Image (cartoon, helix red, strand yellow):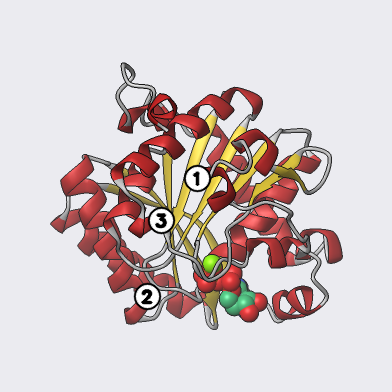
Amino acid sequence: MKKVISYSSGKGGVGKTSLVANSGVLWAEEGKKVLIVDGDWSLGKMALTLGVKPQWAIHDVLEGKATLKEAAQGVTRNLSLLASPSGVMGFEELSEHQRNQLFYELDALQDDYDLILIDHSSGVHWGVIQFAAAAHNHVIVTTAEPTSYMDAYAIMKILSQRFKIRQFELIVTMSQSLVETQKIIERFIDITQSHLEVTVREVGHFPFEPKLAESLRQQKPIASLYPDSLFIRQLAKVCKTLEKLPNERGNGLKFYYSQNINPLAAR
Ligand SMILES: Nc1ncnc2c1ncn2[C@@H]1O[C@H](COP(=O)(O)OP(=O)(O)O)[C@@H](O)[C@H]1O
Ligand SMILES: [Mg+2]
């Protein structure tokens, strides 16, 4: 089943890019064709986390220098990356036309992949939220810190109230004490479900893993460096859960552009 999975967190530095990068590596090793979209345009570190130096980035597509197909570069046999440019305008600053163009081109690419993973930038920007809303499934990444789960709550509030997203998959990261974190997160899920019309399901709980910093230093994903680590074994289980989820929106990325207007024609 074709699937677009959006990963959001609100707060940065919670380990989202590490999770998306390594999920991509694991799925690709299983033979799934995977595209990772680095949605963190101004400060994206997906290429670094995967240990590649991409030739193209998303802004080359918007400036007409490359097609999306060209810009989506191979990382491994089944894994491609649509990289983010460094230090240029972010997705939140795109014009309506540029945003539509990106949706249109990404939608056309969906047939080439089994899974498209979108790693969003932190913060609650309208453009980011719109992009997130167009996905089939919604993963929210948080730590057990109030600064992180309050932002996770804010994202879920906007996605549920503005876009009627009803189902969220929660990943908890960087946990120093699994028992204590579990209590905090269960309470957080209860409060969220009683205040918002949503179902929140915890799909993974990751301990603080120092090997992640080492893998970044070596510029190799931990899935390649330490495939037998607890982190990767747990992530493999999360991937299994996510791939079985029913698609929440039949149309995926088509949701946000008019099917009658080809924005490329207006270039
Ligand atoms: N579970 C974890 N345990 C320890 N360190 C982590 C964990 N996840 C991520 N990190 C570290 O935190 C930093 C930020 O990670 P990153 O994945 O880029 O976060 P984000 O995308 O949320 O900003 C990196 O230095 C990474 O090595
Ligand atoms: Mg990131």
Mark 2 Cβ inside 8 Å of ligand 1 = no
Q: Which residue is mark 3?
A: 91
Of the residues shown, which amino acid type is indicated by label 3?
Answer: Phe
Q: Position of residue 66 (x, y in %)?
A: 63, 40
> Are the residues at dot 1 and dot 2 in contact (C-beta closer than 8 Å)?
no
Q: Quadrant of the C terminus?
A: top left
Q: Can residue 207 be spotted in the picture?
A: no
In this rendering, the answer to whether 219 lies above or below 168 is below
Residue 82 lies left or right of residue 98; in this view the side is: right
Secondary structure found at label 3 = helix
User: How packed is label 3: few (under 14 Cα within 10 Å), some, or many (20 or more)?
Assistant: many
Question: First in sequence: mark 1 or mark 2?
Answer: 1
Of the residues shown, which amino acid type is indicated by label 2?
Answer: Ser
User: How packed is label 2: few (under 14 Cα within 10 Å), some, or many (20 or more)?
Assistant: some
Question: Which quarter holds ligand 2?
Answer: bottom right
Q: Which residue is mark 1?
A: 62
Q: Position of residue 157 (x, y in %)?
A: 21, 56
Q: Quadrant of the N terminus?
A: top right
Residue 185 lies left or right of residue 40; in this view the side is: left
Label 1 vs label 2: CA separation?
32 Å
